[in-house]
Image (cartoon, rainbow, N blue to C red):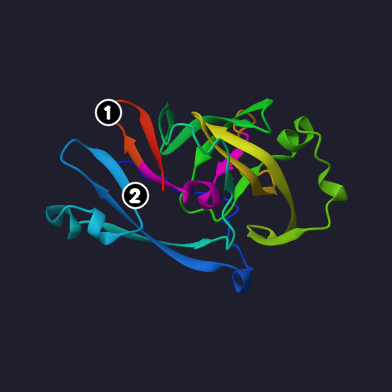
């Protein structure tokens, strides 16, 4: 059983600032048990599965987030909800606000809604850092912010850049968990058990 992680947004998210982003390539493969794996190294894929592995080309922020708690656990298994073709996990933002996020390997940055930003006492209008995003209605300048921390199943990153924009047309979903978080981990998705496995690189 396979699962498609990239969220098909009606606004067609397209990051236009490729000038300061570096290209990243990931491979997606499914083992004999139906577990979906992602890796940035082809040699991590068993030879039998290499021919069927799919390539994911994405943009990656040049500066990775900082890891907290250096002596803490390096692996976690997080239960997820499957809503249609997307995977939704619960994260803790800035150590105080729980948020349901779509796991999106096609999104360069993590994204939070305007309502979630307000819960975190972030004022989007007061932020001069902007990112051009192509939507169905044209290009907009979405504000950027820096999250103090984001914790997914005990895997915590600090100083993570996030875009503030209402990307998901569902008020119960707070945004997208993008590559600037996910690229710090090896990712396995067990669709049978409903678990997202993260292992720090």
Residue displayed at 42% across by 36% down:
74
Picture residue at 26% right of the left edge, 50% below the top: 29
Residue 15 lies within the magenta run: no
Residue 93: x and y in percent read: 65, 33
Q: Which residue is mark 1?
A: 192
**What's the residue at 57%, 60% (across, down)?**
61
The disc at residue 19 is: none
Q: Mark 2 or 1 closer to N-term? A: 2
Assign a secondary structure to mark 2.
strand
Helix, strand or loop for disc 1 = loop
Front position in the image: 187 or 68: 68
Q: CA distance from mark 2 to mark 1?
A: 17 Å
User: Left of 63 or right of it: where is 124?
Assistant: right
Quadrant of the drawing holding the N terminus: top left
Q: As displayed, is residue 103 above or below residue 106?
A: above
Which residue lies most toward the bottom here?
19
Q: Is residue 28 above or below residue 74?
A: below
Residue 114 in picture, x, y percent from top left: 74, 40
Q: Residue 190 in the image: state x and y as whole percent.
A: 30, 33
Is residue 139 rendered to the left or right of residue 28?
Answer: right
- Asked if the stretch drawn in magenta spans residue 184, the answer is yes
Q: Which residues are magenta?
A: 174-187
Residue at left 56%, top 54%?
64
> How many other residues sit within 10 Å of disc 1, few (<14), some (14-19) or many (≥20)?
few
Q: Is residue 199 left or right of residue 120?
A: left
Residue in the foreground of this view, choosing between 166 and 105: 105
| Marking on residue 38 | 2
């Amino acid at each position: 059983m396979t699962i498609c992680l990239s969220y098909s947004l009606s606004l067609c998210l397209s990051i236009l600032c490729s000038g300061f982003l570096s290209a990243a390539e990931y491979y997606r493969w499914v083992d004999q048990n139906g577990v979906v794996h992602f890796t940035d190294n082809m040699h991590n894929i068993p030879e039998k599965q290499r021919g069927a592995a799919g390539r994911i080309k994405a943009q990656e922020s040049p500066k990775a987030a900082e890891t907290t708690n250096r002596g803490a656990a390096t692996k976690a298994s997080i239960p997820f909800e499957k809503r249609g073709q997307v995977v939704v996990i619960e994260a803790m933002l800035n150590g105080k606000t729980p948020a349901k996020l779509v796991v999106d390997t096609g999104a360069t940055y993590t994204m939070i809604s305007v309502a979630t930003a307000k819960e975190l006492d972030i004022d989007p209008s007061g932020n001069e850092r902007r990112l051009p995003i192509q939507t169905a209605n044209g290009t907009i300048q979405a504000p950027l912010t820096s999250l103090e921390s984001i914790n997914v199943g005990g895997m915590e990153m600090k100083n993570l850049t996030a875009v503030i924009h209402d990307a998901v047309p569902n008020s119960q979903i707070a945004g997208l968990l993008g590559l600037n978080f996910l690229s710090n981990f090896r990712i396995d998705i067990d669709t049978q058990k409903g678990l997202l496995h993260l292992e720090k690189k």
